[in-house]
Image (cartoon, helix red, strand yellow):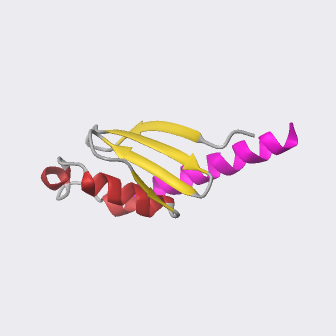
């Protein structure tokens, strides 16, 4: 079983978002920002988005709280399915 799964997606305003499933949590890089790690995916997502230099200009138009929760739910489901499939192999 691999230790790290990775997803690449984009924020609603088009910034590149790289999400990695680590052994003990999640790593997220938004745009050109520094990577952040946290045990909880939704926290890692919102912290990485806020840490990116372009966040302030876009924050008023997009509900990032709801968007990050929905993305976190989807990626966690995908991660659980992938891990279950790897255990079954």
Q: Quadrant of the N terminus?
A: top right
- List the single residue furthest toward the left: 57
Q: Look at the picture and state if 75 lies above or below 1.
A: below
Coordinates of residue 46 in the picture (x, y in percent): 35, 59
Q: Is residue 25 above or below residue 13?
A: below
Q: Position of residue 69 (x, y in %)?
A: 45, 60
Foreground pick, 65 / 19: 19
User: Residue 3 vs residue 34: left or right?
Assistant: right
Q: Could you tell me which quadrant the C terminus lies in?
A: top right
Residue 31 visible, this orientation: yes
Q: Would you say 6 lies left or right of 49 here?
A: right
Residue drawn 45% across the image and 61% down it: 42
- Where residue 19 appears, as percent x and y from the top left, is 47, 44
* Residue 34 is a magenta residue: no
Look at the picture and state if 61 lies above or below 39: above
Q: Residue at x 51, y 54 (%)?
A: 26
Residue 69 shows in this picture: no
Q: Nearer the viewer, residue 40 or 63?
A: 40
Q: Which residues are magenta?
A: 68-89
Indicate the position of residue 64 as horizontal and vertical percent values: 32, 58
81 in the magenta segment: yes
Residue at position x 57%, y 50% from top? 22
In this image, 54 relative to 70: left or right?
A: left
Task: Determine which quarter of the picture holds residue 3.
Answer: top right
Q: Residue at x 15, y 55 (%)?
A: 56
Count up the numbered dots. 0
Secondary structure, magenta segment, majority class: helix
In the image: residue 24, left or right of residue 63: right
């Amino acid at each position: 079983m691999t230790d790290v799964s990775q997803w690449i997606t984009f924020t609603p305003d088009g910034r590149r978002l790289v999400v990695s499933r680590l052994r003990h949590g999640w790593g997220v890089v938004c745009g050109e920002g520094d990577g952040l790690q946290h045990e909880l995916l939704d926290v890692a997502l919102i912290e990485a988005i806020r840490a990116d230099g372009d966040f302030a200009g876009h924050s008023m138009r997009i509900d990032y709280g709801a968007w990050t929760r929905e993305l976190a739910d989807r990626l966690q489901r995908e991660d659980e399915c992938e891990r279950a499939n790897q255990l079954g192999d």
